[in-house]
């Protein structure tokens, strides 16, 4: 619906933050996403300054019949937001740590890097995602997988409470004791329940870990990859690993040892004694000649260096799903589609090892999907003229890989949610139905846009 000048003036007077309407040149910077191909153009965007602004914006939207979406750092966008009111929480970026209780109180706009830095002086660390650049709250709402996944589980397993603005504009607290169904839903349900303004996260004692990446050059990729697949069958729960086939572009921004090469990156993280970590890694180090060995004892503040995900925005095509157990036949199919000789259009083909703590749900349960899966699988492309080909290659591989694909999904790794059917498949049916009941309780009129393409909250 159209908003009058008077409506917008009233909203601007009511909030401490900033209000932009469609057509304002300043809006673009505030609603920009990590994927530069996705451009949000809502009817109105409110860059909130505090929790009271969130409540005001929600009430305004309800009064004017506007659906409400939310964005923090701009990661995780699946499609453009083209209508309604967008609440931008990037300025709610405070992080405080209670060292005695091992609790971090995290604003909706804070990135993992801020949480890591705030916890480190006390010898503590969050169970973070792989990229410190991503928003902590948005990523955690979908589960959250990072370098401590097998040893410590999903990020959301460590949440102890949320503050949430619900559809009538009031603020509620969600914990195991207060609004427990809402708390269950927020731990993995991602969105459509309200706007989280604050999260209380339990931190873990961690100063250093034995971690990093082994890189294998093209001639040794197959040998190293097959060894890793075999190794994962008996890997201890306290070791988290992943692999990525990387097609490094020949550009100056890429360091010389990697520039223009096709490599296998094998990531390793062990939050324990470095001598034991070295012993556990030994079979992988000896599997094939290592091109670059970057595994050593590192401070917990350097966890982001393990995956070394890029920070800069750019055009992105990605596809994700979960896998069950994989074997050497899977490796053969993988390399045929994405290996050095495949002429793959993708810059990265990644597989993360699950299990361990990710397979054990928290007391009281959570809405996180994929706990019984064995691996994540992700394809990433960054060259727009190749996007159509990427879709065809991904579809062909998915068809051939059916016997290894898990029936489970996780919303943070389910990038194809462009239809109601695909979106519903991002959770097990019973979880999706329970989430729908919780949403009906806390948002009976469906104010918070949530569904295919444009309305999933972003990290």
Image: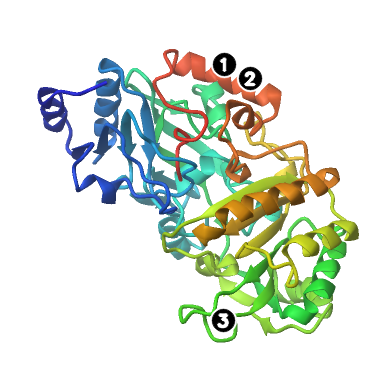
> Where 192 falls versus 121 (above or below)?
above
Which type of secondary structure does the marked residue at label 1 adopt? helix
Please say which color scheme the image uses. Answer: rainbow
* Neighbours of disc 2 within 10 Å: few (<14), some (14-19), many (20+): few
> What is the spatial separation of the Cα atoms under label 1 and label 2, in whole angstroms?
6 Å
Q: Residue at x 25, y 18 (%)?
A: 64
Name the foreground residue: 204 vs 108: 108
Q: Residue at x 67, y 64 (%)?
A: 344
Q: Which residue is mark 3?
A: 259
- Horizontal side of 425 relative to 312 (left or right) equals right
Name the foreground residue: 147 vs 247: 247
Residue 433: image tag: 2
> What is the spatial separation of the Cα atoms under label 3 and label 2, in whole angstroms?
48 Å
Question: Residue 49 is drawn in which quadrant?
Answer: top left
Q: Residue 430, percent across and down?
A: 69, 22
Which type of secondary structure does the marked residue at label 2 adopt? helix
Instruction: Find out whether the residues at labels 1 and 2 contact each other: C-beta distance under 8 Å.
Output: yes
- Horizontal side of 34 relative to 2 (left or right) equals right
Residue 401: image tag: none
Q: Residue 202, percent across and down?
A: 53, 46
Question: Residue 224 is drawn in which quadrant?
Answer: bottom right
Which type of secondary structure does the marked residue at label 3 adopt? loop
Mark 3 vs mark 2: give the one in front. Answer: 3
For marks 3 and 2, the one nearer the N-term is: 3
* Neighbours of disc 1 within 10 Å: few (<14), some (14-19), many (20+): some
* Neighbours of disc 3 within 10 Å: few (<14), some (14-19), many (20+): some
Q: Residue at x 17, y 37 (%)?
A: 16
Q: Residue 297, percent across and down?
A: 62, 76
- Horizontal side of 320 relative to 443 (left or right) equals right
- Horizontal side of 342 relative to 283 (left or right) equals left
Residue 437: image tag: 1
């Amino acid at each position: 619906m159209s908003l009058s000048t008077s409506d917008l003036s009233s909203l601007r007077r009511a909030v401490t933050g900033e209000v932009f309407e469609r057509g304002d040149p300043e809006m673009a910077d505030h609603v920009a996403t990590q994927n530069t191909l996705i451009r949000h153009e809502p009817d109105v965007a409110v860059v909130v300054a505090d929790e009271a602004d969130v409540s005001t914006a929600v009430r305004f939207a309800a009064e004017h019949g506007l659906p409400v979406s939310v964005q923090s750092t701009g990661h995780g966008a699946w499609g453009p937001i083209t209508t309604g009111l967008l609440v931008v929480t990037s300025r709610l970026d405070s992080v405080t740590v209670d060292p005695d209780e091992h609790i971090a109180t995290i604003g909706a706009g804070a990135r993992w890097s801020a949480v890591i830095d705030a916890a480190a002086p006390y010898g503590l660390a969050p169970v973070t995602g792989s990229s410190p650049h991503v928003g902590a709250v948005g990523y955690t709402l979908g589960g959250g997988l990072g370098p401590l996944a097998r040893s410590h589980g999903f990020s959301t397993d460590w949440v102890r409470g949320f503050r949430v603005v619900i559809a009538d504009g009031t603020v509620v607290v969600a914990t195991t004791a207060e609004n427990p169904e809402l708390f269950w839903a927020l731990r993995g349900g991602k969105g459509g329940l309200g706007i989280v303004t604050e999260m209380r996260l339990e931190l873990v004692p961690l100063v250093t870990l034995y971690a990093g990446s082994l890189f294998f050059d093209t001639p040794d990729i197959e040998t190293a990859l097959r060894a890793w697949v075999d190794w994962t069958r008996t890997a201890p729960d306290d070791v988290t690993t992943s692999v990525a086939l990387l097609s490094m572009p020949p550009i100056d921004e890429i360091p010389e040892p990697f520039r223009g090469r096709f490599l296998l990156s094998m990531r390793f993280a062990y939050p324990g004694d470095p001598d034991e970590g070295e012993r556990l890694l030994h079979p992988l180090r000896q599997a094939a000649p290592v091109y670059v060995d970057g595994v050593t004892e590192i401070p917990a503040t350097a966890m982001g260096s393990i995956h070394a995900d890029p920070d800069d925005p750019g055009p992105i095509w990605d596809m994700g799903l979960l896998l069950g157990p994989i074997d050497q036949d899977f490796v053969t199919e993988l390399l045929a589609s994405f290996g050095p000789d495949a002429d793959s259009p993708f810059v990265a083909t990644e597989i993360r090892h699950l299990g361990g703590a990710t397979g054990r749900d928290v007391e009281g349960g959570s809405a996180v999907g994929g706990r019984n899966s064995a691996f994540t699988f992700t394809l990433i492309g960054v060259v727009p003229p190749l996007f159509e080909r990427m879709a065809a290659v991904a579809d062909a591989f998915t068809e051939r890989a059916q016997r290894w694909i898990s029936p489970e999904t996780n919303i943070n790794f389910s990038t194809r949610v462009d239809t109601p059917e695909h979106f519903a498949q991002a959770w097990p049916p019973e979880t999706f139905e329970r989430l729908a009941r919780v949403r009906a309780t806390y948002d009976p009129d469906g104010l918070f846009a949530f569904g295919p393409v444009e309305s999933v909250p972003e990290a």
